[in-house]
Amino acid sequence: MLYNLLYPLSLSDQWSFLNLLKYITLRSIGASLTALVICLLLGPFMIRGLQAVQGAGQPIREDGPERHLLEKKGTPTMGGTLILLAVSLSTFFWANLANPYTIMVLVVTLGFGAIGFWDDYVKVTKQHSRGVSGRTRFLMQSFIALLMAIGLKWAGGATFGYLSLPFVKDYAIDLGWWYFPFAILVIVGSGNAVNLTDGLDGLAIGPTMLTAASFMIIAYVVGHYQFANYLGIPHVAGAGELTVFCGAMVGAALGFLWFNTYPAQVFMGDVGSLSLGAAMGAVAMVTRHEIVLSIIGGIFVLETFSVIIQVASFKLVGKRVFRMAPIHHHFELKGWAEPKIIVRFWIISIVLALIGLLTLKIR
Ligand code: 57M
């Protein structure tokens, strides 16, 4: 909004300093700091409010690691509402709201957030870990993902429908109509992958912050004609504005981590995990870096595949591969302390983010 309202004033000499607002880098850092401050200032009030409303807090499953029942009972959930508030307000304040990609990604983020909020609300009010049926959630999530794909087709761009490959220059696979189910796979898959991962304090928000930070760089270079051509990556005019949205995500994630770090004072809930994951999926689609997202967000992929492997193995041969899936529970049951699991997963995330960014250069 600042950009839309104040940048035109920069044409007059007395307001020429407002010319700074045209720089995406400045507005991205502004968005990060604004989202961070919103989370830090409102966090304590949000936690007290959630505790007052939720009483018993997050229902802890009986069949999980016993430690969770002992240590985590009563922790409030749905802290993701603060993340979404911080991201939305900060993006609204600092981004160019005439940019269609910013609006599309915000709609996906808030849409998945609404689905997650409904699921959390049902779980907390019923005090049971089963919320809205998986089928209902999948259908609603798929509808939003399809809307995003239609929006991308409308926004055009010569590279619509093409799947660009990391490390491969000047070649992309034309998915044709398969692009639409692919959009569901990327956006719904990302949302639910973060959802599965969010099972230990800070385990999901750390890699989410790293992914958003990586996509600040990716969105900036993809949206920059000279940089994109120099790097041999697809140029998507206007995608650079998503640097501001990703900056807001980084700031909000840092702010939420202040309260979600071990021992967590609040959990993000499905309202947070589904929306953050879907947001990253949507950004990856706009910037044509869907496969790179699976590298940078490799922790989310690992967690998801650990469940797929566990269920498939149990159904096919009646044996479990892991002591418990997702894989963070496996390490818990091996006796690793929670902070050790979390920080080691963050270290892996940092390595994967660096490898993902390397794909910008190695082609
Ligand atoms: C999402 N939710 C956490 C919190 C968070 C198919 C199967 C793999 C599904 C999976 C499942 O139920 N996933 C749901 C994970 C839950 O966290 C809440 O959910 C939100 C995220 N969606 O924001 O509100 C619990 O995680 C802990 N937690 C923290 N700190 C945090 O910052 O400690 C969360 C955030 C919270 C808290 O205890 O209550 C969760 O784990 O449920 N199922 C599982 O993950 C279960 N695995 C399982 O059944 N494995 C089977 C088969 C199906 C693969 C097997 O291995 O044989 C495990 N999870 C739990 N209990 N809680 C084991 C059973």
Image: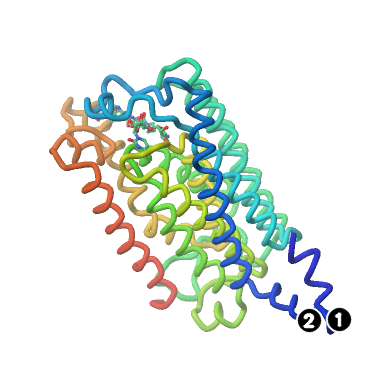
Check the image and tell me how it is coloured. rainbow
Occupied quadrant, residue 60: top left
Residue 76 locus on image (x, y percent):
44, 30
Q: Residue at x 38, y 25 (%)?
A: 74
Quarter placement of the C terminus: bottom left
| Residue 319 versus residue 205 in the image, above or below | above
| Residue 154 versus residue 192 in the image, above or below | below
Q: Quadrant of ligand 1?
A: top left
Q: Residue at x 43, y 17 (%)?
A: 127
Mark 2 residue's CB less than 8 Å from ligand 1: no
| Residue 23 versus residue 340 in the image, above or below | below
The residue that label 2 is drawn on is 16
Few, some or many residues within 10 Å of mark 1 (<14, 14–19, 20+): few
Residue 355 locus on image (x, y percent):
34, 67
The residue that label 1 is drawn on is 12
- Secondary structure, mark 1, is loop
Few, some or many residues within 10 Å of mark 2 (<14, 14–19, 20+): few
Occupied quadrant, residue 286: bottom right
Residue 238 locus on image (x, y percent):
67, 67
